[in-house]
Image (cartoon, rainbow, N blue to C red):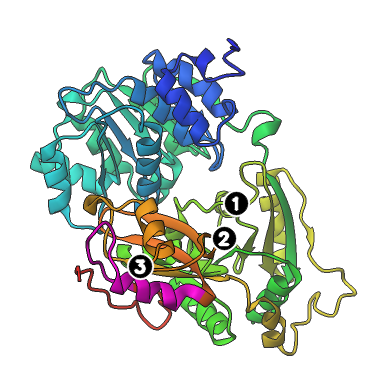
Amino acid sequence: MEDSPTGSFEGLGLLPALVEAARGRGYGAPTPIQRDAIPPLLAGRDVIGAAQTGSGKTAAFALPLLQGVQKDPRTIQVLVLVPTRELSAQVASEFRKLGRGLHGLKVVELTGGTPAKPQRESLARGAHVAVGTPGRIEDHLERGSLDPSHIQSVVLDEADRMLDMGFGPDVRRVLGYLRRDRQTALFSATFPEAIESMVADVLRDPVAVEGDSGQDAEPDIEERYQVTGRNRFPALCAVLAHCPHESAIVFCNLKATVSEVTGSLVAAGVRADRLDGDLDQFHRDQVLSRFRGGSLSILVATDVAARGIDIDALDLVVNYELPPKPDGYVHRIGRTGRAGKSGLAVSLATRVELDGLGAFEQATGRRMSPLLPEDHPHYSAPPKNPGALLAQIREAAPMETILISGGRKDKVRPGDIVGALTGEAGGLRGDALGKIEVRDTISYVAVQRDFARRAVEALNKGRIKGKKYRATLTGSTINGPQKWTPHRG
């Protein structure tokens, strides 16, 4: 067995169960951020980490902190603060998967936008790790439902995003409830002055680690621009048609623009949906599940709504409007070109805005070039029939997503859903099924479009683990979110 800390998880001092879990998550060897962060965290040191999404950052802090968790008493010992509910779900899921070999481990999510009572009940039953947003965590601390006395380690994940969203005071109030001898880790993609101030105030002699140092973490992103007129939609159509993709995110600066662009895409027959602040948590989760499962090819989003989302293998990012600041540009394009995969980022810019692209190039250290050559008919002149260009991507997103009214708390597992659909009652082939996501009280399953209605009928007529659940196809939110009553049949 290899002993080098740079070459193996065993060499980092992790328990065999955690080493096995890391390999089960696809890590053959530690990523740079894991190699550098795990040893000091295991030693109880404070850590400040520079890490982009896709660098293996969550496992870098989850693995060593899980190793220090004591099963008895069942109290919160690790607290992770994140900026969004979506990121909370992802981080909590990663803790559960990495801690699968630690029998009895309990992870609880504490986020706003969802009822607080079930969270209080989960805390009362006991848990070891809490992941959530600053405001809701502060609320639980104020009400006494979250006992801070046993919290040994706290993580501030995507700290720059939390400050951008105005959570700085909430974070400091939460930290004020915690013991002074705690271990603190802070991870951030950028380090503005406010982050440096927080580091000085809340971390003790931290070890600095950098996840994107070295070639392994360098994103492979091709950056282009497309000249547009005042009406940007035709230029967007030209970009989408010119750049082959299975999945794309289109960023807008305003919610109104998100709705307008999404409506135009849907009207043209494109499988697109929106992600903005007007959606409640249930429908945000639904849109993201459809996108991850291949039921949508394009997601149109604002910066705030898209923060913290984790989408694998995203082919294309389009800046429909340029972000106001360079760090916003870095965060947007960082959604693609992750984990060793290549990606493309295209920014729509009027001729007046072209001079401003230099600030973005300086932020990334990479030059932008035009997407289309100057002699191309769509270089600066909008296509006369943008709908015709979109016709070639209408058949993207080959799946439909089904919502089922049973989840983790009902003891529903992915294998149970597969069995219900491929068994005698369902009769579907296994290759007709796609991504399955099991949440606390609901589940999503992606099914090839040709078999989707048959799958819904089979689920509604049949049973999962002997119980009846309601199943329905999810749909677009562009004309208002669908109503859903998650009752059991």
> Residue 323 — which label?
2
Label 2 Cα neighbours within 10 Å, binned few <14 / some 14-19 / many ≥20: some
Counting residues from the start of the chain, the first of labels 1 and 3 encountered is 1
Report whether 335 appears left or right of 369: left
CB within 8 Å, label 2 to label 3: no
Residue 354 vs residue 32, the one in the foreground: 32
In x, y percent, where is residue 218? 68, 38
Q: Quadrant of the N terminus?
A: top right
**As drawn, which residue projects farthest toward the top?**
3
Q: Are dots 1 and 2 in contact, CB under 8 Å? A: yes
Q: Which residue is mark 1?
A: 326
Secondary element under disc 1, as helix, strand or loop, is: helix
| Residue to which mark 3 is pinned | 403
Residue 63, percent from left and from top: 41, 26
Residue type indicated by callout 1? Pro
Examine the structure image and report whether residue 457 is included in the region drawn in magenta.
Answer: yes
Measured in 3D between alpha carbons, the distance from the residue under mark 1 to the one under mark 2, in whole angstroms, is 7 Å
Q: Is there any visible trace of residue 253 in the rendered image? A: no
Q: Magenta stretch?
A: 451-471
Q: Is residue 294 above or below residue 189?
A: below
Percent of width and height locating residue 474: 39, 73
- Identify the secondary structure beneath mark 3: strand
